[in-house]
Image (cartoon, rainbow, N blue to C red):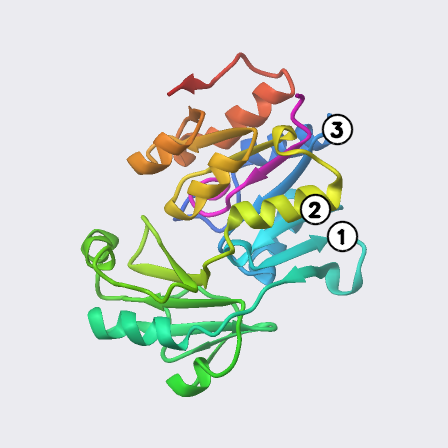
C-alpha cells in the first residue's frame, strides 16, 4: 500500500537533543512531503503545547499529533488557540510513582494537567513547558494524562538497569529515555501505537498506509504497528530490531532522507535490518 501518513517522533528524530529548531533541510523536506500530498504528523512524549512551536516552525497549516506517549490526540490548525484535543486518556499515577521512588530515590516528579506541569522541583532548563512547583501530594492528586520522574544528577545509563528491577502496578507502564535519566508513566493500555491507531481511524487510514520514524524506547510499539517502521541511526538495539528499516542519525538529518525518498527527491536510503 502507498504511504499516506508519516508519523515522526520529535526529540532525537525530528529535532536533535541540542537544538530548539529543526534544520533547514528537515524543514524543507517536511514541506515538500506535504506539497506532494503526504500527511505529516507527530508521535511524541511531548505535550501538545510542546509540539505547537514545531508545527509553527515547520509552517504546517494542518497537522496531527499523538502526544504524551499516546494519551492525547491533538490537531493543530485553524482552531481556537491553534490546537484542539481530540481525545485523551487519564490515569492515577500515585502508586506507580511511589514504587519507583522507593526503588530509585532522588527523582523530581511531574504530572501534566490541562496546560501545566506540576512539579516537585525545577527540571533542567528547557525540558518542560509551563511548569509550576507543588507538593508531591498535589502533583499526584487525581487523574492525569502523563507523569514523569527525572533524576537530574544521574545519567540514562545509570538509571536504565535500575528501572529493569522496578515492578510497576499492572495498570501502568514505564517508558525510559535513552537521552536522559527520565521515566514517563502512562496507562498500560496506552502507547504511541494505540494513539497512532486512533489517529488512523480518525483519518480513515490503514496501518499499512502509515510510515513511522523513531529513535527511543517509547517508539517500540509504534514502529511495530506501522506498515513501515523506520529507526534513526544510533537508536538502541531494541529499537533497531523493532524497525523494518533504518535511516541516518538525527545529526545527519535522517528524517529528511526518509521524506526525500518518499517524494522521489533522493535515491532509496533505507538499509533493511
Query: Is label 1 in contact with label 2 (beta carbons under 8 Å)?
Result: yes
Q: Main secondary structure of the magenta part?
A: loop
Q: Is residue 88 left or right of residue 139?
A: right
Of residue 133 and residue 20, the one placed in the foreground of this image is 133
Name the N-terminal-most of marks 1 and 2: 2
Residue 73 lies in the magenta stretch: no
Left or right of 171? Residue 182 is: left
Tell me which residue sits at (67%, 41%) in the image.
200
Q: Which residues are magenta?
A: 1-15
Q: Secondary structure at mark 1?
A: loop
- What's the CA distance linking mark 2 and mark 3? 13 Å
Above/below status of 79 relative to 4:
below
Vertically, is 235 above or below 36?
A: below
Q: Residues within 10 Å of mark 1 (few under 14, many from 20)?
A: some
Residue count near mark 3 (Cα–Cα under 10 Å), binned few <14, some 14–19, many ≥20: few
Q: Which residue is at a point 53% across and 76% down the rendered structure image?
A: 143
Q: Residue furthest top?
A: 267
Q: Quadrant of residue 233?
A: top left
Label 1 sits on residue: 77
**Toward which corner of the image does residue 201 lie, by quadrant?**
top right
**Which residue is disc 2 drawn over?**
63
Instruction: Please name whichever residue, 190 or 150, is drawn nearer the observer in this view of the structure.
Output: 190
Q: Which residue is mark 3?
A: 37
Q: Residue shown at 49%/51% (left/top)? A: 20
Quadrant where the C terminus lies?
top left
Mark 2 crowd level (few <14, some 14–19, many ≥20, 10 Å Cα)? some
| Residue 5 location, quadrant | top right
Amino acid at each position: 500500500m502507498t504511504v499516506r501518513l508519516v508519523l515522526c517522533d520529535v526529540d532525537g528524530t525530528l529535532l536533535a537533543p541540542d537544538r530548539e529548531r529543526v534544520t533547514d533541510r528537515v524543514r524543507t523536506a517536511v514541506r515538500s512531503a506535504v506539497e506532494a500530498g503526504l500527511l505529516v504528523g507527530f508521535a511524541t512524549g511531548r505535550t501538545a503545547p510542546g509540539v505547537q512551536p514545531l508545527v509553527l516552525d515547520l509552517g504546517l497549516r494542518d497537522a496531527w499529533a499523538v502526544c504524551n506517549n499516546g494519551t492525547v490526540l491533538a490537531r493543530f490548525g485553524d482552531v481556537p488557540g491553534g490546537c484542539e484535543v481530540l481525545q485523551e486518556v487519564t490515569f492515577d499515577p500515585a502508586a506507580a510513582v511511589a514504587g519507583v521512588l522507593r526503588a530509585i530515590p532522588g527523582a523530581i516528579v511531574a504530572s501534566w494537567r490541562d496546560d501545566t506541569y506540576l512539579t516537585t522541583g525545577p527540571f533542567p532548563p528547557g525540558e518542560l513547558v509551563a511548569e509550576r512547583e507543588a507538593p508531591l501530594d498535589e502533583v499526584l492528586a487525581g487523574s492525569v494524562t502523563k507523569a514523569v520522574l527525572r533524576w537530574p544528577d544521574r545519567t540514562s545509563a545509570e538509571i536504565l538497569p535500575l528501572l529493569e528491577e522496578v515492578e510497576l502496578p499492572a495498570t501502568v507502564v514505564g517508558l525510559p529515555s535513552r537521552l536522559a535519566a527520565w521515566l514517563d508513566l502512562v496507562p498500560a493500555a496506552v502507547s504511541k501505537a494505540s494513539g497512532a491507531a486512533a489517529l488512523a481511524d480518525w483519518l480513515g487510514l490503514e496501518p499499512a498506509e502509515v510510515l513511522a520514524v523513531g529513535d527511543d524506547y517509547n517508539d517500540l510499539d509504534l514502529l511495530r504497528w506501522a506498515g513501515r517502521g523506520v529507526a534513526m541511526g544510533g537508536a538502541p538495539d531494541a529499537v533497531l530490531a523493532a524497525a523494518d528499516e533504518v535511516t541516518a542519525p538525527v545529526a545527519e538529518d535522517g528524517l529528511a532522507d526518509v521524506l526525500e525518498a518518499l517524494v522521489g527527491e533522493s535515491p532509496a536510503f533505507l538499509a533493511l535490518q
